[in-house]
Image: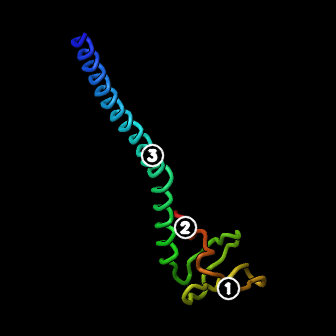
Amino acid sequence: MNLFLMTAYAEAGAAGANAAAAGAGGMLSALIMPIAMIAVLYFILIRPQRKKDKLTKEMLAGLIVGDRIITIGGLYGKIVSIKDDTLVIEIGQGAEKGTLKIARWAVREVEKPAEA
């Protein structure tokens, strides 16, 4: 009977070791999934937004007098003067010309001249 008990304890110990090894594998798999999700979110959401922000900053930094722009409010105009973070733009044509003072960040895009 003593031999029977020793065999049972040995089998229980081996089963416990196998469960510990399976638990370590389960922990590894549970750790890999969140890391993979964070990586996917980074490449789908965060990285493209940072690229877009960088391009917008470059566009705003490259504004010069004479550029034709479109504001975020949908106004089309030509830059007349630039002071720090404010722009004076000329809108309208002919007798209906007028000027507006806007913030630099309010520029959505610079119009590209028509290429012939």
Q: Decide: few, some or many residues near mark 1? Use Cα within 10 Å; few <14, some 14-19, many ≥20.
A: some
The residue pinned by badge 2 equals: 112
Ranked by sequence position, the earlier of labels 1 and 3 is 3
Residue 51, compared with residue 38, is above or below; it is: below
In this rendering, would 41 be left or right of 27? Answer: right
**C-alpha separation, residue under disc 3 versus residue under disc 2:** 35 Å
In 3D space, how far apart are the residues under numbered discs 1 and 2 (Cα atoms)?
Answer: 22 Å
x and y, in percent, of residue 37 in the image: 46, 44
Q: Disc 3 designates what residue? A: 40
* Disc 1 + disc 3, Cβ < 8 Å: no
Q: Nearer the viewer, residue 111 or 104?
A: 104
Residue 111, picture quadrant? bottom right
Asked whether disc 3 touches disc 2, contact meaning CB atoms under 8 Å apart, the reply is no
Q: Secondary structure at mark 3?
A: helix
Dot placed on the residue nearer the N-terminal end, 3 or 2: 3
Q: CA distance from mark 1 to mark 3?
A: 42 Å
Instruction: Give the SS element for disc 2.
Output: loop
Q: Earlier in the sequence, mark 1 or mark 2?
A: 1
The local crowd at label 2, few if under 14, some if 14 to 19, many if 20 or more residues have their Cα within 10 Å, is few
With respect to residue 92, does 41 lie above or below?
Answer: above
Q: Which residue is mark 1?
A: 101
Q: Where's residue 86, x and y in %? A: 60, 85
Amino acid type for the residue under numbered disc 1:
Lys
Numbered disc in front, either 3 or 2: 3
Q: Residue at x 41, y 43 (%)?
A: 36
Residue shown at 70% from the left, 70% from the top? 73
Residue beneath the point at 64% across and 71% down? 70
**Residue 32 vs residue 93, the one in the foreground:** 32
